[in-house]
Amino acid sequence: MSSRDLLYLSLADVTLACQEFDVVDAIREVLCLHAEGQTTLPAEAYLAWTGAGPGQARSLNMPGLVGGKVRAVGTKIINANTANRAGGLPRASGLTLLFDPDTARPVCIMEGAFLSAQRTASVTILAVQHLSAPGAARAGLIGAGAQASAHLGLLLSRLTGFTEVSVFDHDEDRAHELCQAHALAAKEHAVSLSVVRSAQQAVEGADLIIPLTTTTEGYIPHAWLKPGAVLVNVSLDDCLPDVAMDAGLVVVDDWGLIKDDERRLLGRLFREGRICGPEEALAGRRMVDATLGDLIVGRHPGRTGPEQIILVNPFGMAIGDVMLAKATYDSAEQLGIGLTLPFDTLEA
């Protein structure tokens, strides 16, 4: 492809290209690079508005740079409207753009929601691999959308110790559809899938809890969590403050992004003077213990006891999307897939 051309990768192209590399290994590598200071991660740009319908619309623009031997630069634009499902549209959709690291010219534009879900699920898998208590076997998923599907797919194939997954969604039919879509994989890996009728049923007794919702009001108290449980708070506000304050270990992906966020739980607790970042040790505050990168590079030991309840609160880092976009682009080039678009420019 000419350096003056732009490659477009559809969802089908991205899905096919992703089969050529290990998404979890790619995210492990970028977390290591982030822990070693070889990434650049600006704050996200957030825009919200109210459309003609009942839903709340928003757009996120999340740029990132991955250094080291990867050398990838790009940005993810992910949009959503909570009312989309009623009109037969996905709640979230987006694009990921990849830039030439030397000239800064855009070289590829690809469907971004699939990559975003794969990045998020890969972070969860890595967290569980490093933090699960011995003998962890039961998982509870809250929510049955695209993120839940990505998580369940990786959970079945990567977390071989888990033998039971329960799913709750306010739309029970949707929860059954999710289980049905993964029924063959669950059978292959000897995992029992079931639909439960409340979030509390999904949480209580589970070794791993993954909220995957759009709620802005917390509902999970610390009292629901069994000793040794890991809760990966993928969505915004499912946890009540006592989950963070009373957890034996609190792990994040990037403290800078989290403390600057005005909408999510840990950012609010930071501004209320109740928590602080790793190694800050401010009097009267609950300190965040580590980042996922710290765990992966061995800078923090992770779990220190089998009954320790652990909260993992990933913000969602664009460098993960950029990492996956670079691997996807390289695979697409090797496979010869995608649509080449002319990228005409005016010469200075």
Image: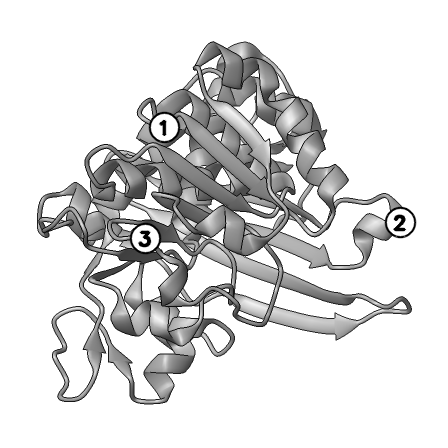
Q: Which residue is mark 1?
A: 162
Q: Residue at x 39, y 44 (%)?
A: 206
Quarter residue 110 falls in: top right
Q: Quadrant of the C terminus?
A: bottom right
Work out whether 90 lies above or below 107. Answer: below
Towards the viewer: 74 or 277: 277
Q: Nearer the viewer, mark 3 or mark 2?
A: 3
State how far apart marks 3 and 2 are (Cα).
Answer: 39 Å
What's the residue type where badge 1 is placed?
Answer: Phe
x and y percentages locating residue 5 in the rendered image: 62, 31
Quarter residue 341 falls in: top right
x and y percentages locating residue 330 in the rendered image: 46, 23
Q: Which residue is mark 3?
A: 226
Label drawn at residue 107: none
- The crowd level at tag 1 (other Cα within 10 Å; few <14, some 14-19, many 20+) is many
Determine if residue 332 is in view: no
x and y percentages locating residue 231 in the rendered image: 37, 53
Determine if residue 248 is in view: yes
Towards the viewer: 261 or 335: 261
Q: Which residue is mark 2?
A: 87
Element at badge 1?
Answer: loop
Q: Left or right: where does residue 311 sit relative to residue 135?
A: right
What's the residue type where badge 2 is placed?
Answer: Gly
Earlier in the chain: of badge 3 and badge 2, it is 2
